[in-house]
Image (tube, rainbow, N blue to C red):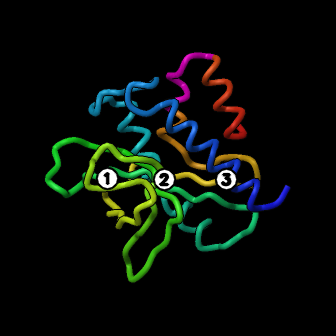
Amino acid sequence: MSMILSGAIAFIVMFVAYRLFAGGAGVAFDKDDPRLEQAKQQARATLPQFWTALDAGDPATRDFMLKFNLNHGTGHRDNESIWACDIRRDGGRIYGTLANAPRNSAYREGQEVEIRPEAIDDWGYFRGSVAQGNYVTRLMIEAAPAGTARMQRQAMGW
């Protein structure tokens, strides 16, 4: 399978996971849920693994994504945790492309945005066919109905 095709498949898997778990579509947590906060803390604590893999440029790793609060520091009172792909760092800043349509109408899917490090909630990429990171995603899968969880684990290579 070509790298382009396998990359497209991995992106679709992550996008489908987002759609299954976004908003009212499946799993929702209170923003103060201690399990959610623990997953976010674990993701932040292991973020150096993400940067190391991204910087290595290994062709066996692909589809690097960050999940972050789009509204962090904007004065908008609601959190909007969203995935960004095409992650890059430039001059000490982090940039990514919004991987799905945001609720905040000031942004659009496909828009490049700056990602503040303190706004990062989760990270993920694929090493071969196995998803790495995805701490919040793992929590969402654990809370999903059994059939959905089984399909998502399989899609993520777990």
* 102 or 119: nearer the viewer: 102
Query: Within the magenta stretch, is there residue 141?
Result: yes
Within 10 Å of the Cα at label 2, are there few (<14), some (14-19), or many (20+) other Cα atoms? many
What residue span does the magenta drawing correspond to?
139-146
Query: What x and y, as percent, mark residue 150?
Result: 67, 24
As measured in the structure, the alpha-carbon distance from the residue carrying label 2 to the one carrying label 1 is 12 Å
In the picture as drawn, the residue positioned furthest to the bottom comes out as 91
- SS at mark 3 in the image: strand
Instruction: Say above or below: 131 vs 115.
Output: above
Q: On the rendered image, what quadrant is the N terminus found in?
A: bottom right
- SS at mark 1 in the image: loop
Query: What x and y, as percent, mark residue 105?
Result: 27, 49
What residue is pinned by disc 3? 126
In the picture as drawn, the residue positioned furthest to the right comes out as 1
What residue is pinned by disc 1? 70
Given contact means CB atoms under 8 Å apart, are the residues at marks 1 and 3 in contact? Answer: no
Q: Earlier in the sequence, mark 1 or mark 3?
A: 1
Query: Within the magenta stretch, is there residue 50?
Result: no
Q: Indicate which label's residue lies in the foreground, 2 or 3.
A: 2
The numbered disc on residue 99 is 2
Q: Which residue occupies 56% across, 48% down? A: 133
As measured in the structure, the alpha-carbon distance from the residue carrying label 2 to the one carrying label 3 is 16 Å
Query: What x and y, as percent, mark residue 108?
Result: 37, 55
Within 10 Å of the Cα at label 1, are there few (<14), some (14-19), or many (20+) other Cα atoms? many
Q: Which residue occupies 30% across, 27% down? A: 30
The reply, left or right, for residue 69 in relation to residue 43 is left
Q: Indicate which label's residue lies in the foreground, 1 or 3.
A: 1
As measured in the structure, the alpha-carbon distance from the residue carrying label 1 to the one carrying label 3 is 23 Å
